[in-house]
């Protein structure tokens, strides 16, 4: 089976600062990997590199069969990144955001309604502009957009933040369903819930992974 992610001695620069300093990582399809480590360790940069948003300047970096050194843009339609910056249009309603995504990707008519059910967003909120939603409600909309996109690689940066207990349960269910369907999942989180979801923990420090700390987790 081909790997979903393969980084070998990968180096990424943010300006002149080396955010990844020779990182090694392999992730298989269907695997949920939690990335842990201190702030500034390179975890978010790794997610952004996997999404083709920052260049890998040295080493090997292959995501979903795409060589990021040769063409990092080709991987973007295949991945879904959920980060702190927001991934929805504030001036559109919840329903409009999801319909727009579904049409752009030529998903079936029920894709947006299935996504809303998956994140358990109340019907009363679906015709509101995203700008009027709370942080937790907006996070659910962002998760619904990911559900519509059906990425082959999920890249989740602190995904539990802002979600209540029901929202966290919906998120965890979506992650397990995605992995069960063959998608790979990379999660950056300091939340205890993330360890329960993950199959394996990888520690990142100083822009490198620590192989000795790559530990199986399993579902509690």
Image (spheres, rainbow, N blue to C red):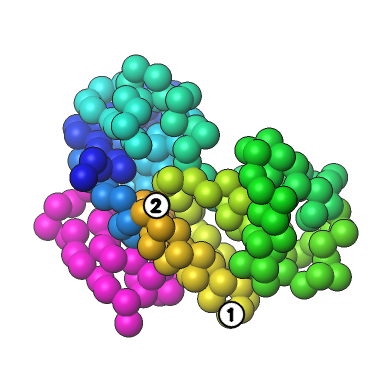
**Which mark, by number, is residue 105?**
none
159 to the left or right of 148: left
- Tell me residue 117's x, y (percent): 67, 68
Q: What is the magenta range?
A: 191-220
- Tell me residue 171's x, y (percent): 53, 67
Q: Which badge, 2 or 1, comes first in the chain's sequence?
A: 1
Please identify the quadrant where the C terminus is shown: bottom left
**Which mark, by number, is residue 165?**
1
Q: Residue at 34% of width from left, 35% of height from top?
A: 63
Furthest-top residue in this view: 70
One can see residue 89 in this view: yes
One can see residue 155 in this view: no
- Tell me residue 111's x, y (percent): 66, 54
Q: Nearer the viewer, residue 179 or 54?
A: 179
Q: Secondary structure at mark 2?
A: loop
Mark 2 closeness class: few <14, some 14–19, many ≥20 residues within 10 Å: many
Q: Residue at 42% of width from left, 24% of height from top?
A: 72
From this view, report whether residue 82 is shown above or below residue 137.
above
- Tell me residue 185's x, y (percent): 39, 54
Q: Secondary structure at mark 1?
A: helix
**Which mark, by number, is residue 183?**
2
Please identify the quadrant where the N terminus is shown: top left
Q: Residue at 45% of width from left, 59% of height from top?
A: 178
């Amino acid at each position: 089976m081909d790997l979903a992610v393969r980084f070998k001695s990968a180096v990424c620069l943010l300006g002149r600062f080396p955010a990844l300093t020779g990182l090694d990582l392999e992730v298989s399809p269907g695997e949920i990997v939690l990335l842990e480590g201190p702030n500034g360790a390179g975890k978010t940069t790794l997610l952004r590199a996997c999404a083709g948003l920052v260049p890998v300047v040295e080493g090997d970096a292959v995501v979903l069969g795409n060589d990021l050194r040769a063409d990092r843009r080709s991987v973007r339609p295949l991945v879904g990144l959920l980060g702190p910056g927001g991934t929805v249009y504030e001036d559109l309603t919840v329903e409009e955001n999801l319909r727009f995504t579904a049409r752009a990707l030529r998903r079936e008519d029920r894709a947006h309604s299935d996504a809303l059910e998956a994140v358990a967003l109340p019907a009363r909120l679906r015709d509101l502009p995203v700008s009027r939603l709370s942080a937790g409600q907006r996070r659910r909309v962002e998760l619904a957009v990911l559900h519509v996109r059906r990425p082959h690689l999920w890249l989740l940066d602190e995904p539990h933040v802002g979600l209540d207990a029901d929202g966290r349960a919906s998120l965890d269910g979506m992650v397990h369903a995605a992995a069960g369907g063959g998608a790979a999942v990379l999660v950056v989180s300091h939340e205890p819930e993330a360890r329960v979801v993950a199959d394996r923990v990888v520690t990142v420090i100083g822009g490198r992974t620590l192989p000795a700390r790559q530990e199986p987790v399993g579902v509690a």
